[in-house]
Image (cartoon, rainbow, N blue to C red):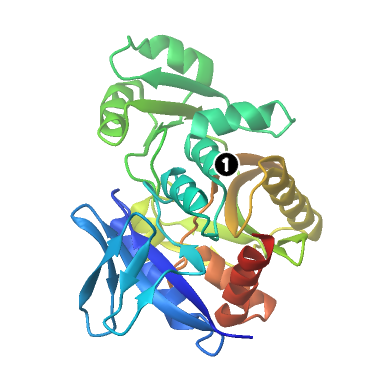
Amino acid sequence: MPKKHIAVVMGGYSSEYEISLQSGAIVCEFLNKDKYYVYAVHIKTEGWFYTSENGKQHPINKSDFSFDTGDQIVRPDAVFNTVHGTPGEDGYLQAYFELLGIPQTSAGYYQAALSFNKRDCLSVLKNFGIKCAKSHYINKGTSVDINEIIKTLGLPCFVKPNRAGSSFGISKVHRQEELLPAIEKAFDEDNEILIETALIGVEVSVGVYTQQGTVMALPATEIVSENDFFDYEAKYLGKSQEITPARISEEATHRVQEEAIKIYQLLNMKGVCRSDFILQNEVPYFIEINTNPGLSKESIVPKQVRETGMSLTEFFDIIVEHTLTKN
């Protein structure tokens, strides 16, 4: 079988740009070079470029996503999407590639847009009986009743931008006077915010993927943050322990994996997703799903993959093969 041309798309227009570059670099490093020609494609505000190994930038022709390597014109057979945030995790790139007929590894455009909007995603899943924290929504410019929010949700609570990742703009609020500054901080990231009751329990994250038509869960990871919650520092600057497998009972592990698979199927996901939960009395409460989870060396999914005994090369191959055969 001839080698396929795979573009690994990374970067984007959000605060997660640098983190996405780390994820993309790992995918480029570990994709099987015997099976695939691998191209690093950087999505930047100033343009889209294939970046060769010597660092030279070759502009992407956006009319068909082709590029000139200097030796040939390449139009990729598939895209490995590692853009966190906009435009790779919120549906824009997914819709673009669908219009061009180029398969890509992550969720479809509607599924990406829905899951990227935390409150819309929660609204859908609650109707299917998925347990979630109590929540309250605010749009920029609308009035805020601090007393009513605290009466409804209690303290502590979390204030989150509705459409952002990597914990940018999130605050954990313990006292009433902290709530308004936390809301203003979240509005710096998005004009819609979500306030949720802070659940008390064990934070657990589960990767889910599809292999030959079967939806599979990776081992659960327990997250123990040195900070007040799993914020940016905890995620990327070593201020947390990420323990795989999670130190929870076999029954709780099975329950949270089944819940992660159920959510993946309810939302009609594909590729690899990662769902985050709080286990409260061993019952999983859903927090959010990431359709382009981090794949850097510090990220959770690669640790879960290694725990199964698979190499990242084997795992990425499963994701690419599924993408190529499904389309």
Compared to residue 75, the image places residue 36 above or below, namely: below
* Direction from residue 65 to residue 1 in the image, left or right: right
Figure check: 221 above or below 94 = below
Question: Picture quarter containing residue 128?
Answer: top right
- Image quarter of residue 144: top left
Mark 1 = which residue?
111
Q: Quadrant of the C terminus?
A: bottom right
Residue type at mark 1 is Gln
Please provide percent x and percent y for residue 9: 39, 64
Q: Going by the image, does 160 lie left or right of 45? A: right
Asked whether the viewer can see residue 133, the reply is no
One can see residue 126 in this view = yes
Q: Position of residue 230 (x, y in %)?
A: 44, 51
Give the residue at x 70% y 25%.
127
The answer to whether residue 79 is left or right of residue 285 is left
Q: Residue at x 28, y 49 (%)?
A: 13
Q: Which element carries disc 1, helix, strand or loop?
A: helix
| Count of numbered circles in the view | 1
Q: Is residue 1 above or below residue 268?
A: below
Q: What percent of the width, then of the height, locates residue 192?
A: 37, 26
Report crowding for label 1: few under 14, some 14 to 19, many 20 or more residues within 10 A (C-alpha).
many
